[in-house]
Image: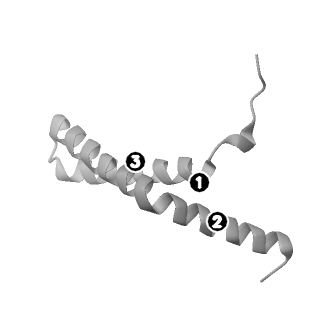
Amino acid sequence: MSSFNRSAIDWVSIIALSLLLLIAGQIGERLSFGNRSLGALVTTLLFAIGFAVWSCSLHDTVTHAFAIVATALNLGWT
């Protein structure tokens, strides 16, 4: 069995998609007016749209921005 390597995990994506799911769930709950099936459907659709946007355009931009900031902090730039 191989060991678990935390550095191989894309933490930016995990955090961003977790926040996206939280926000989609809250919006779905508000728009469903107490109907669980409608809330689940709205939440699923909002998450699918957000995931598509994240995967197609925002992922590389956000990851690149974090890499620049991390590099600047490591080199002592402020």
The residue located at (77%, 69%) in the rendering is 71
Is the residue marked by circle 1 packed among few (<14), some (14-19), or many (20+) residues within 10 Å? few
Give the SS element for disc 3. Answer: helix
Q: Is residue 59 left or right of residue 38?
A: right
- Which labelled disc corresponds to residue 72? none
The residue located at (31%, 46%) in the rendering is 48
Is the residue marked by circle 2 packed among few (<14), some (14-19), or many (20+) residues within 10 Å? few
Q: Quadrant of the C terminus?
A: bottom right
Q: Name the N-terminal-most of marks 3 and 2.
A: 3
Residue type, label 3: Leu
Q: Are marks 3 and 1 in contact (CB under 8 Å)?
A: no
- Near-viewer residue (16 or 67): 67
Tag 3 residue: 21
Tag 2 residue: 66
Q: Name the N-terminal-most of marks 1 and 2.
A: 1
Q: Are marks 3 and 2 in contact (CB under 8 Å)?
A: no
Q: Are marks 1 and 2 in contact (CB under 8 Å)?
A: yes
Q: Is residue 69 left or right of residue 34?
A: right
Residue type, label 1: Val
Q: Is residue 40 left or right of residue 57?
A: left
The residue located at (27%, 54%) in the rendering is 27
The residue located at (80%, 81%) in the rendering is 77
- Relative to 40, does residue 57 appear above or below in the rendering? below
- Which labelled disc corresponds to residue 12? 1
Q: Name the N-terminal-most of marks 3 and 1.
A: 1
